[in-house]
Image: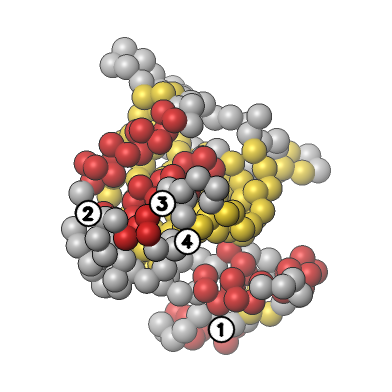
Amino acid sequence: MAQADVRELPLDVGVRAKVDRPFRGFGKEPLRDFGRSYYVLNIQYAKSELDLVAPVNEKEVLVELHAMLQKNGYRQISDSEEPQILLTVAYGRGYLPNPYLANATPTAEGLLSSEAGIGTPAVSVTNPIQVFKQKQAGFEAKLQNANLEKLYLRVSAYEYPKENQKHPRQVWQVTMLVDAPHRMDLNVVYKAMLAAGVPYFNKEVEDQVDIRNPLHRGNVEVGIPIGRAK
């Protein structure tokens, strides 16, 4: 796919965003901003059985990430500063967990077939939230599409570790994805993926938000952002 094609053809970018909010008392702790000063630890290719269609220019991906972060109010630290958050970047292709089945329970038979590499887990719908969702128009199509293999770019944020803290706490994660990894070149679409996903950093989304042509003004968002840090 040529560079011009990404602006000329319809491109849907899915965004999945979650924030670590432990339960406190009768509910989860409120959303909060974990900080805007950052340092990128690394970028890694999450290699799978099938290779990407082309090697990825990781340097250019990071250049665009820094630009989009600055545009959305984040600041790369100077040499004399400690960051508030540490970022890691991963990319690859593969079958990701289906967010539309978050409230469904896999059956024993489905788990066995999935572990054997046969299809996707069958589910038993006992949660009323899941029952309600599956009655919504278009839900089944979204669920089935989410089962397909994806080309993805994922940014994870960790709280800068305190003294004597053994492991940094992951505080939020955003996964940006597109269909057809067998023909889609990440070098062509990473700008669109970051344009769609970076505005959702440190925010929560229910299931997935789908954004049509994120590099164009007036893009269409389909999905439900359920929380934004104040």
The image shows residue 116 at horizontal and vertical percentages of 42, 84
Q: Which residue is mark 1?
A: 110
User: Marks 1 and 4: which is nearer the front?
Assistant: 4
Assess disc 4: are there few (<14), some (14-19) or many (≥20) residues with their C-alpha within 10 Å of its C-alpha.
Answer: many
Q: Which of disc 4 and disc 2 is earlier in sequence? A: 4
Q: Which residue is mark 2?
A: 56
The image shows residue 10 at horizontal and vertical percentages of 44, 63
Taking the image as shown, residue 84 lies to the left or right of residue 210, namely left
| Mark 1 to mark 4 CA distance (whole Å) | 30 Å
Assess disc 2: are there few (<14), some (14-19) or many (≥20) residues with their C-alpha within 10 Å of its C-alpha.
Answer: some
The amino acid on which the numbered mark 4 sits, given as a three-letter code, is: Asp
The disc at residue 193 is: 3
| Quarter of the image where the C terminus is located | top right
Confirm or deny contact between disc 2 and disc 1 (CB under 8 A): no
Give the residue displayed 45% in from the left and 36% down from the top: 158
Res 142 quadrant in image:
bottom right
The amino acid on which the numbered mark 2 sits, given as a three-letter code, is: Val
Furthest residue toward front: 8
- What is the secondary structure assignment of the residue under circle 4? strand
| Mark 1 to mark 3 CA distance (whole Å) | 32 Å
The disc at residue 12 is: 4
Confirm or deny contact between disc 2 and disc 4 (CB under 8 A): no
Taking the image as shown, residue 146 lies to the left or right of residue 8, namely right
- What is the secondary structure assignment of the residue under circle 1? helix
Coloured how? secondary structure
| Mark 3 to mark 4 CA distance (whole Å) | 9 Å
User: Marks 1 and 3: which is nearer the front?
Assistant: 3
Res 102 quadrant in image:
bottom right
Give the residue displayed 29% in from the left and 56% down from the top: 4
Taking the image as shown, residue 123 lies to the left or right of residue 115, namely right
Q: Which of disc 4 and disc 3 is earlier in sequence? A: 4
- What is the secondary structure assignment of the residue under circle 2? loop
